[in-house]
Image (spheres, rainbow, N blue to C red):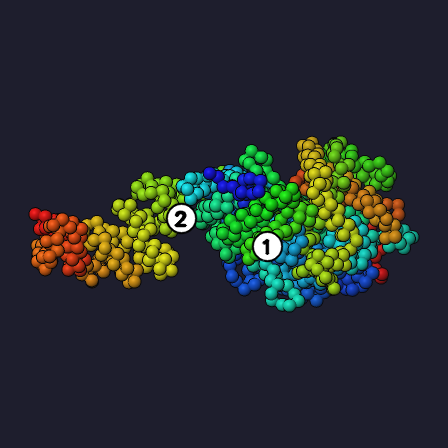
Amino acid sequence: MSYTIEGNTGAWEIVVGLEVHAQVISKSKLFSGASTLFGGEPNSHVSLIDAGFPGMLPVINQACVEQAVRTGLGLKARINLQSRFDRKNYFYADLPTGYQISQFEHPIIGTGVVQIELSDGSTRDIGITRLHLEQDAGKLMHDQDPKRSFVDLNRAGVALMEIVSEPDIRSPEEAGAYLRKLRQILRYLGTCDGNMEEGSMRADVNVSVRKSASEPFRTRCEIKNVNSIRFVMQAIEIEAARQIEIWENGGEVDQETRLFDPHKGETRSLRSKEDAHDYRYFPDPDLLPLVIEQSWVDQIKQTLPELPDEKRARFQQDYGITAYDAGVLVAEQATADFYESVAKGRDGKSAAAWVTGDFFAALNRTGKSIEESPVSAANLGAMLDLIADGTINGKIAKEVLEDMFETGEAPLAIVDRKGLRQVTDTGAIEATADEIISKNADKVEQYKGGKDKLFGFFVGQVMKATGGKANPAIVNDILRKKLDG
Amino acid sequence: MLTDLTIAQAAEGLRKKEFSAVELTKAHTDAIDALNGRVNAYITVTSDKALEAAKKADSTLAAGEAPALTGIPLGIKDLFCTNGVRTTAASKIIGNFVPPYESTVTAKLLENGAIFLGKTNLDEFAMGSGNLTSAFGGVENPWHRKDDASVLVPGGSSGGSAAAVAARMAMGATGTDTGGSIRQPAAYCGIVGLKPTYGRCSRWGTIAFASSLDQAGPMTRSVEDASIMLSAMAGADPKDSTCANVAVPDYRAACGRSLKGLRVGIPAEYRAPGMSEEILAVWQKGIDMLREAGCEIVDVSLPHTKYGLATYYIIAPAECSSNLARYDGVRFGERAEGATSLDDLYEKTRHNGFGEEVRRRILMGTYVLSAGYYDAYYLKAQKVRTLIQRDFTQAFQKVDVLLTPTAPTAAFARDEKPEDPVQMYLNDIFTVPASMAGQPAMSVPVELDDKGLPLGLQLIGKHFDEETIIAVGSALEKAAGFTALPDLRAGVSA
């Protein structure tokens, strides 16, 4: 059942399209040699070009173009071998030249697709309309002085990719899934760090509602600059409810730009269509049309990593793990790589259970990322080998893993240091079993009288007596012979 | 007099130790001291720096292997950013701007040994044809009509450069040409002005008027001098994406090249109705001289010429409206006092900072780019521009070079300035089409009209074929034997 919002007049469907601004990972800015490093002293990463000095000219940064092409390939999109930069003209204090260089009519990347997974296990394709390159603006600071505003141009001129989706999204959940998937793809590609808190990924959300899927689209509102996935989902719900109320009360939704206020839980008007800027776009005469070669695109394609969708399918196929586990393991490239190092040449299912189970739990508990893990994939793999060859059992392995997290030592070293090798000597186990049986004659009587559950008690006692090191299968065998025989 | 020498002659004299670079420079700074009060060719004079540089030039010359322009004193249009030297674009809005960088063209000239005397006057942001819109006052043309003391305009926008070169206040000067700003003042002041192919000289560090048209070029007293300066100014620049990566030939070698068999096109459309008999006569004289020199004269047609001016006055203002947006009082420009909001700050600053003509063009440009008008004006103009370019491409399949008048009239008097701005724009009617098509073009002085004012003819060449216009220009120069001197010049008391 698809997502709807119940109004007074029945169910409403929501229609959402997202425009994501993703900051390109590059050393220098889109049209200047200034550094893109985040968090420098205000105005410390600014070239004369970024500050719009007279006579300064932009020169396209090839690395940024490569990143855009890489992203286009990752979105299975059409790569436009010829594109063009246009000027978007408007006055604002954070925009030194009075225009932003963007791509209006001829973007570098055309239509593509992102496949999203939903909580019920189903998937949907969300269309990508286009991706274009443009400059970021500077940042105004209003809190430095009671009377004046300051401007920091460190961000001015940094390359952004604006990724525009089709209005294919039909629920807040889908919007969240789309953003998570897009971020995952960008991170896999290494083209954007996807860090929404630092503003390196921001979303403009276009929302409209309609009574049924057969009805044409109604007027939409654009919610600007929403900076977390959760807020995007909230903003959609709140804005859709506002629009439904207007329609149901016989009103008309005005096309306008709105802001989402997460504290008040509302959207409010920023500017109406009448006040919309006339950006006076025209081709930037300082730049030639951007022409790239198919052979260069093919070369970039060769260097593309395996993307999450393909990786997940392969993990299921090669390691026999569930779609769910595969999804969890490919969420981050680093996790996928870690898992694959552990699973390669071993039992994939058991590797998945250990990685997503005790290993993740330990990371969580210690607040460490997988890159900071004291347990290397090689060592976790070695631990799995110790289980497989009977050196330790699963229970002891948990203890060994704990120790590995603390010391970073190899599992075998820990096993030897602590004397945790599994006891497989039947004679020794038999002696212990005899001792336990003779000490608990009453329980033996009860067991033989039909109290089957007591078998577990004897197993437990033997394990306890051997410090957990006895091979559980051998213990079972011996006890069966002695008690049932 | 040292100030009467051409660059070629002075370069030789310096190498023969007939005089020193210091002496040559001093002669020019003296001329500036004597004349600039009246001519107003310079906005900023840098005599001390020039003499300092001249001393260095003398040691370079003494050591031998000095580059071509070593010790040659030049004027620099105040649109080229010069490191540590105020650069104003003749506008109040950046009247105190001191760039911390050197434009590519002036940097190349400095590398080539040139000495800069100062920054020459121009129409504000290079917008004008009479040097009447400068915030630093008008420039007086060193030429005057016979028995008439009226102050004439030097043309524009490179009017200060043209006047300085004509009055011997510089041996040569840089100009920039967007729709005729090198060629028209050269014609008005009786000197040579060469606008190279668009993309021949870097635009980096030159204050932009209309980026798709702006091109730097030399203004000199001989074609040979123009060729020497152009060799130093031209060349690829990784900092300007529109600057072509085309090898720079030895332009000077083209001077005096034989014209045998060269085909010279005469475009019918430049025979505009109402054109003065004098202009038609000098044009005919030029045709005869080139035929005499061995050229074949061919009638050609550039059918879209009549749309050139209208198209230009859409595209150039459109680009300028965007290029000048940065002068908003936030970083540059005299910030207006008492603003109540950011928009108010912009409005006040820009109203006070820009002159009337610049404001007019910004408004026109903003209008033609606006939603609802873009297709009818800007887009249509771009299409017509393509047709104008095609006219030239087709003509150059038949001929090697075109010969036309440079301007429809000789220099006019300041008080004859037309009230209607469109009348003013008509000064550019012959120069604009070549700008729109990016062709190289040069104005060469040919003779005086019956009032004693210089008239020039324009040569238009194929893209990156400056050599042919230099070859034809030097032949025209030789045949015309233009030796007249302006009455206002170094050594003649003002």
Asked if badge 1 and badge 2 are on a common chain, one would say yes
Q: Position of residue A149 (x, y in %)?
A: 64, 63
> For this rendering, which residue is in front, A164 or B494?
A164
Q: Position of residue A289 (x, y in %)?
A: 59, 42
Q: Mark number for residue A57?
A: none
Label count reads: 2
Q: Residue at x 69, y 53 (%)?
A: B325
Specify the amino acid type for callout 2.
Answer: Ala
Label whose residue precedes the other's in the sequence (1 or 2): 1
Q: Is residue B275 left or right of residue A420?
A: right
Q: Position of residue A207 (x, y in %)?
A: 57, 44
* Identity of the residue drawn at 64% across and 47% down: A256
Kindly report which numbered mark, 1 or 2, lies closer to the viewer in this rendering. Answer: 2
Name which residue lies at 33% across and 49% down: A339
A29 to the left or right of B119:
left
Please report, as a chain letter, where disc 1 is located: A
Mark sitting on residue A331: 2
Q: Could you say which quadrant of the image residue B487 lies in?
A: bottom right
User: Callout 1: few (<14), some (14-19), or many (20+) C-alpha neighbours within 10 Å?
Assistant: many
